[in-house]
Amino acid sequence: MVPNRIKQIWSKGGQAINGWLSIACPFTAEIMAEQGYDAITIDMQHGLVGYEVGTTMLQAMRASGVTPMVRVPWLDPGAVMKALDAGAYGIVCPMINNAEEAARLVSYVRYPPTGNRSFGPTRVNFAAGADYGQHADDEILCFAMIETAEAVENIDEILATPGLDGVYIGPADLTLGLTGRKYRTGFDREEPEMIEAIKHILQCTHKAGLRACLHNGSAEYAARALEWGFDLVTVSNDVRLLAGAAKASVDKVRELQGGSAVFSSSSAGGY
């Protein structure tokens, strides 16, 4: 079986950088996979990605050698198992709140006797190797998302789940879960109480001998998270990167033109 690149990085004491895909497009996936990320996660929860297109996106990333992961829509056995059969080397599952839910997640990711995953590696048998069934439980990563006050309260019990590799912090939902609407939604938290909560989860995770991951909105915050000791950081996503680069390009043209109006197809009513 093709080894998991993230696990190789960790075995050498390194930290991984993860990209994020919300646009349902194999070409976008292929482009992102060639930019130097260690891993790329397809978002099937909030992203505009269904199973069939998600599978073609996994195919598009194969040549790059990047580790492909999937955030599934919810704690659902069908969604988890189909993502793995399609070729995901890691599962990120949202809204895991307690040990029972964490155990269910692991059971969907691992084959017996550790779990209850049904055997049928339709595509991954070709993408990862014919010996996939023998090695999958050692190579596939299983992450529980920590996003609620209940999850923080139960963090030690969640982390004690056999077969779980670590946790993935979703700062936007975590902020809503811990503070309600006291603060704006979003990533890159600066509020002292949120930084304290994030670091608390990190410390508990490492104390349990597992890996901690954090979703970030900017490269600067991701670098900061790596300094804190996070094992994997996600840097922005395809939607934000496309929007940011497009706006920067347009703004630069207008700046060079002295702020004057420029001809565009939109102002001319079409082509």
Image (cartoon, rainbow, N blue to C red):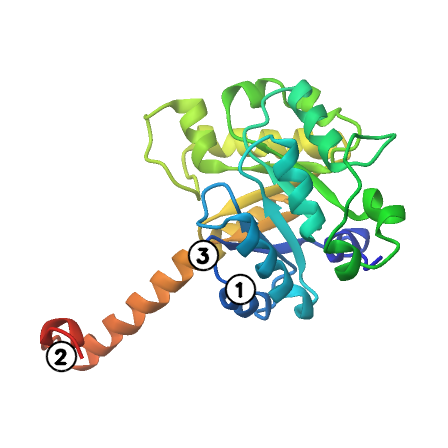
Q: Give how far apart the Cα atoms at labels 3 and 1 are.
A: 9 Å
- Label 3 packing within 10 angstroms: few (<14), some (14-19), many (20+): many
Please give left or right for residue 256 compared with residue 4 in the image.
Answer: left
Which of 86/176 is in front? 86
Q: Which residue is mark 1?
A: 26
Q: Which residue is mark 3?
A: 23
Determine whether 117 is above or below 140 in the image.
Answer: above
Amino acid type, callout 2? Val
Determine whether 2 is above or below 69 in the image.
Answer: below
Mark 3–mark 1 CB contact (< 8 Å): no
Amino acid type, callout 1? Pro
Q: Which residue is mark 2?
A: 262
Badge nearest the viewer, 1 or 2 = 1
Q: Residue at x 74, y 33 (%)?
A: 164
Residue 52, x across and y down, in percent = 56, 53
**What secondary structure is marked by label 1?**
helix
Q: Residue at x 61, y 43 (%)?
A: 213
Q: Residue at x 45, y 59 (%)?
A: 238
Q: Give how far apart the Cα atoms at labels 1 and 2 are.
A: 33 Å
Q: Quadrant of the N terminus?
A: bottom right
Which of 149/51 is in front? 51
Determine whether 25 is above or below 99 in the image.
Answer: below
Marks 1 and 2, the one that precedes in the sequence = 1
**What secondary structure is marked by label 3?**
loop
**What secondary structure is marked by label 2?**
loop
* Residue 247 in view of the camera: yes
Q: Give how far apart the Cα atoms at labels 2 and 3 are.
A: 30 Å
* Residue 88 in view of the camera: no
Mark 1–mark 2 CB contact (< 8 Å): no
Residue 267, x across and y down, in percent = 10, 73
- Label 1 packing within 10 angstroms: few (<14), some (14-19), many (20+): some
